[in-house]
Image: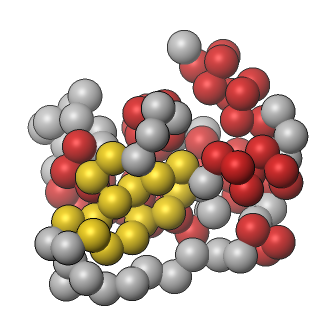
């Protein structure tokens, strides 16, 4: 995939609670979301807690989170900037992220 390719992100109105909960049910995906809770990161920095993670696995984890509506993955020059859709998710599912992230710490 070229670095500047724009990826599809679901409209927040199409994001379902079951998709979000499924995306957050995997420990590796949950760790990525925890990393993003402090602010956006470049794709290479996400999941840095496990540098042995194969690139294909990392891409799949990001795809599941993006398609569930949990993150945005957007081109930024030759890199990709990954961010948590915190405001949108908080407006749609009040307290969900606080509850999940709080219990995961």
Residue 79's place in the image compared with 102, above or below, is below
Q: Position of residue 33 (x, y in %)?
A: 50, 40
Q: Position of residue 72 (x, y in %)?
A: 50, 63
Position of 43 compared to 20: left or right?
A: left
Image quadrant assignment for residue 19:
bottom right
The residue sitting at 54% across, 14% down in the picture is: 105
Residue 93's place in the image compared with 50, above or below, is below
Residue 61's place in the image compared with 15, above or below, is above
Q: Position of residue 7 (x, y in %)?
A: 43, 81
The residue sitting at 73% across, 56% down in the picture is: 88
Count of marks placed on residues: 0
Depth check, front residue: 87 or 27: 87
Image quadrant assignment for residue 18:
bottom right
The residue sitting at 75% across, 68% down in the picture is: 12
Depth check, front residue: 44 or 24: 44
Is residue 27 visible to us here?
no
Position of 87 compared to 7: left or right?
A: right
Residue 41's place in the image compared with 73, above or below, is above
Q: How is the image coloured?
A: secondary structure
Is residue 71 visible to us here?
yes
Q: Position of residue 28 (x, y in %)?
A: 41, 37
The residue sitting at 39% across, 70% down in the picture is: 74
Depth check, front residue: 40 or 71: 40
Position of 79 compared to 11: left or right?
A: left
Image quadrant assignment for residue 6:
bottom left
- Quadrant for the N terminus in the image: bottom left
Depth check, front residue: 105 or 23: 105
């Amino acid at each position: 995939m070229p670095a500047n390719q724009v990826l599809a992100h679901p409209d927040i109105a199409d994001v379902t609670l079951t998709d979000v909960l499924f995306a957050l049910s995997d420990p590796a995906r949950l760790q990525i979301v925890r990393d993003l809770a402090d602010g956006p990161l470049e794709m290479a920095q996400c999941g840095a807690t496990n540098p042995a993670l194969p690139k294909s696995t990392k891409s799949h984890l990001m795809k599941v989170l993006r398609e569930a509506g949990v993150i945005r993955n957007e081109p930024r020059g030759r890199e990709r900037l990954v961010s948590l859709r915190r405001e949108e998710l908080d407006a749609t599912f009040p307290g969900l992220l606080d509850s999940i992230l709080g219990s995961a710490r």
